[in-house]
Image (spheres, coloured by chain):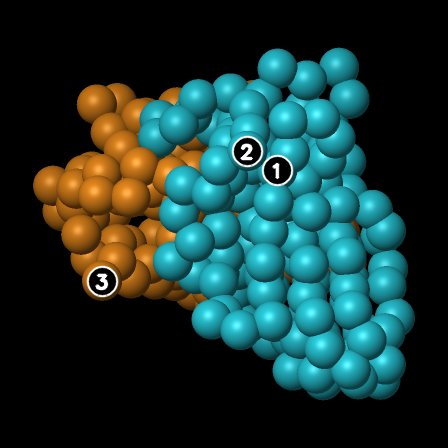
Chain colours: A orange, B cyan
Amino acid sequence: KQEVTQIPAALSVPEGENLVLNCSFTDSAIYNLQWFRQDPGKGLTSLLLIQSSQREQTSGRLNASLDKSSGRSTLYIAASQPGDSATYLCAVIEETSGSRLTFGEGTQLTVNP
Amino acid sequence: NAGVMQNPRHLVRRRGQEARLRCSPMKGHSHVYWYRQLPEEGLKFMVYLQKENIIDESGMPKERFSAEFPKEGPSILRIQQVVRGDSAAYFCASSPIRGAGEQFFGPGTRLTVL
């Protein structure tokens, strides 16, 4: 059974700091990995999608890497801003299911002005 | 291009009543997924549907829950005889293709059972 773990569970940083969020998964047979952002009481916003054949994806100040063989992904946020405060979730789609996302518990990020 | 639409955004039901949650996927998306987020817990997959077909319902509770995605109209998640433990946020997602396709989420329906 696929398990997704995110470390740390919570993170508080001053504005301007570069930071790394970690995600690990137990079964490396995945189609893709997706990073999301969730604001309190709101839905999920897709940030980056990495296909299993890719090593990384970039969007603005965000960079996500994937090491499929070791079951790890990192989300790098450069020059953090208070508006980045949210819960960040990573999720994978396994090859065996081909459909359902398995989510981690999330990292709750607070960026202080 | 409108995103995934869900309604209602908030739904209050008394124990024993029925709850109907609606989801309209993004234009051009034929794959719909439902997920549930219980209080203080992570998101869990419930069911995956294509038009008129349930493809994967491995995450659906065995009783009281059902889902459909008719040829015309939105996808419906139906919960019969709700109990307090059904109180949660229910999210719908859609994608244009299966598997490697990116899933886009709606704003969710927050169900409260009194």
Do badges 3 and 1 share one subunit? no
Do badges 3 and 2 share one subunit? no
- Asked whether residue A55 appears in the rendered view, the answer is no
For the point 72% across and 77% down, which residue is it?
Answer: B82
| Three-letter code for the amino acid on which mark 3 is drawn | Lys
Residue, disc 2: B52
Q: Nearer the viewer, mark 3 or mark 1?
A: 1
Residue, disc 1: B69
Q: In the image, residue B36 lies at what x, y percent?
A: 58, 61
Mark 2 residue element:
loop
For the point 83% across and 46% down, which residue is it?
Answer: B7
Give the vertical position of A33 relative to A12 (above or below). above
Give the vertical position of A3 relative to B104 (above or below). below
**Along the line of sight, which residue is nearer the eye, A47 or B36?**
B36
| Three-letter code for the amino acid on which mark 1 is drawn | Phe
Q: Chain letter of disc 2? A: B
Q: Is residue A109 left or right of residue B109?
A: left
Residue, disc 3: A1
User: Would you identify the image quadrant in which residue A31 lies?
Assistant: top left
User: Would you identify the image quadrant in which residue B16 lies?
Assistant: bottom right
- Asked whether residue A98 appears in the rendered view, the answer is yes
| Three-letter code for the amino acid on which mark 2 is drawn | Glu
Q: Quadrant of the N terminus of chain A?
A: bottom left
For the point 39% across and 27% down, which residue is it?
Answer: B98
